[in-house]
């Protein structure tokens, strides 16, 4: 590179020959590169000179996310000091010029959003949930690292899920196979573990296995286990599962009756494609926390009874119980997976009880 020249990364209209001729009186030569930890947004342009040069009302604008999942493709050009000053004039006040490192290892100027990204509500909510988990663990003399935070993403759009993943969360779950399918392409470039926490119909087994589900938390009938095993065997796959237990004895909820759990686990354990990792319960939807606690205590008791049976092909390391409203009680009673949705993403149109009664 010549002395006093600069490297400039463009991800937008400065890649257009028309804009280059208008701005620099020449066509630039460049190399493709990419800018990590940023994502693109759109900015409406009202500056008449810029509008005339680009012919575009909306320009892309880079927003810093600090997420390894985000990347902006573009081109690095070599320009002179004078041309850099002309570029400063072209870019409106919504942009600022910063030096950044690129995927190639080069360092170059790039114009990014001049506004600092506001604190995310989702990020704040996650911090609050993490703080609640930490406090509950202190009171229960437990290690917070024992607790997995599962984000229940039913009805949550892909962009908001990505925002949560960008905060460092890695475990999400859906209740509906259709939603997994709808969001799959949008989330496919992100790194996360996904569980299924809804009532799984046998006619959806083939479909759900297309989408890299790591664990099905709702095994509650032998016919489901049989058909799942048959399909997994055909595809030469295995999958982690949790046994769903109806600890509240409500007809509106799915799950094995508590006194039938051990016999049911013995049957399911014979299917080599199903790796039993623990138990799951929804518990009672009630403001009477002592009634809720009884459900969680019961699941913990069942876990210990299963452990004593020493059933082959069975682990009892996970207890998935507790949600946004009762996570402290669940942790006190031994939960290892906490399922939260509304406390992170906000209230849904319907109460939790609506989403968990999925008898279709």
Image (cartoon, helix red, strand yellow):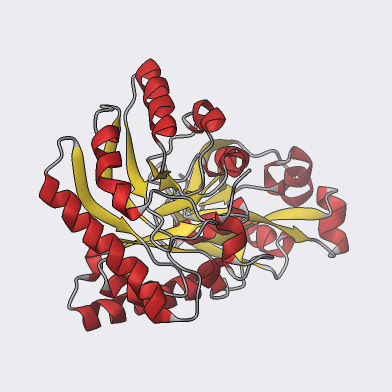
Q: Residue 337, percent across and down? A: 33, 60
On screen, residue 177 versus residue 336, left or right, reads: right
Q: Write the residue at 54% across / 36% down.
A: 201
The vertical placement of 351 against 229, above or below, is below
**Residue 33: percent from left, percent from top:** 50, 40
Which residue does the image show at 67% across and 42% down from the upper left? 15
Q: Quadrant of the C terminus?
A: top right
**Quick one: 114 or 106, which is closer to the camera?**
114
Quadrant position of residue 204? top right
Work out whether residue 350 can be spotted: yes
As drawn, is 48 to the left or to the right of 95? Answer: right
Q: For this rendering, which residue is in front, 29 or 131? A: 131
At a point 60% along the width and 46% down the height, the residue shown is: 359
Residue located 70% across and 70% down the image: 93
| Screen quadrant of the N terminus | top left
| Front-lying residue, 177 or 88 | 177
223 w.r.t. 72: above or below: above
Q: Position of residue 10 (x, y in %)?
A: 61, 48
């Amino acid at each position: 590179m010549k002395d006093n020249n600069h490297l400039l990364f463009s991800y937008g209209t400065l890649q257009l020959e028309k804009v280059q001729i208008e701005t620099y009186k020449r066509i630039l030569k460049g190399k493709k590169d990419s800018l990590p930890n940023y994502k693109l947004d759109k900015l409406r342009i009202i500056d008449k000179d810029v509008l005339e040069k680009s012919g575009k009302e909306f320009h892309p604008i880079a927003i810093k996310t600090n997420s390894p999942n985000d990347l902006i493709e573009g081109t690095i050009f070599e320009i002179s000091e004078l041309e850099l000053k002309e570029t400063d004039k072209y870019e409106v006040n919504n942009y600022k010029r910063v030096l950044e490192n690129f995927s190639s290892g080069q360092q170059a100027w790039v114009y990014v959003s001049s506004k600092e990204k506001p604190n995310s509500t989702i990020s704040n909510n996650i911090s609050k949930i993490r703080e609640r988990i930490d406090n509950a663990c202190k009171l229960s003399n437990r290690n917070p690292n024992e607790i997995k935070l599962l984000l229940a993403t039913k009805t949550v759009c892909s962009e908001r899920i990505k925002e949560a993943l960008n905060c460092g969360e890695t475990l999400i779950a859906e209740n509906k196979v259709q939603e997994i399918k709808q969001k799959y392409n949008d989330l496919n470039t992100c790194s996360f573990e996904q569980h299924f926490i809804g009532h799984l119909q046998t006619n959806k087994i083939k479909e759900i296995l297309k989408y890299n589900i790591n664990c099905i938390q709702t095994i509650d009938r032998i016919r489901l286990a049989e058909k799942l095993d048959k399909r997994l065997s055909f595809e030469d796959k295995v999958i982690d599962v949790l046994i769903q237990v109806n600890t509240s004895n409500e007809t509106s909820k799915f799950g094995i009756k508590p006194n039938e759990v051990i016999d049911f686990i013995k049957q399911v354990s014979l299917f080599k494609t199903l790796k039993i990792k623990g138990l799951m319960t929804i518990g009672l939807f009630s403001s009477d926390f002592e009634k809720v606690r009884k459900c969680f205590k019961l699941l913990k008791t069942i876990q210990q009874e299963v452990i004593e049976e020493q059933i082959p092909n069975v682990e009892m390391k996970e207890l998935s119980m507790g949600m946004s409203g009762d996570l402290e009680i669940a942790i006190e009673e031994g939960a290892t997976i906490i399922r939260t949705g509304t406390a992170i993403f906000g209230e849904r149109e319907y109460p939790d009880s609506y989403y968990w009664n999925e008898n279709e």
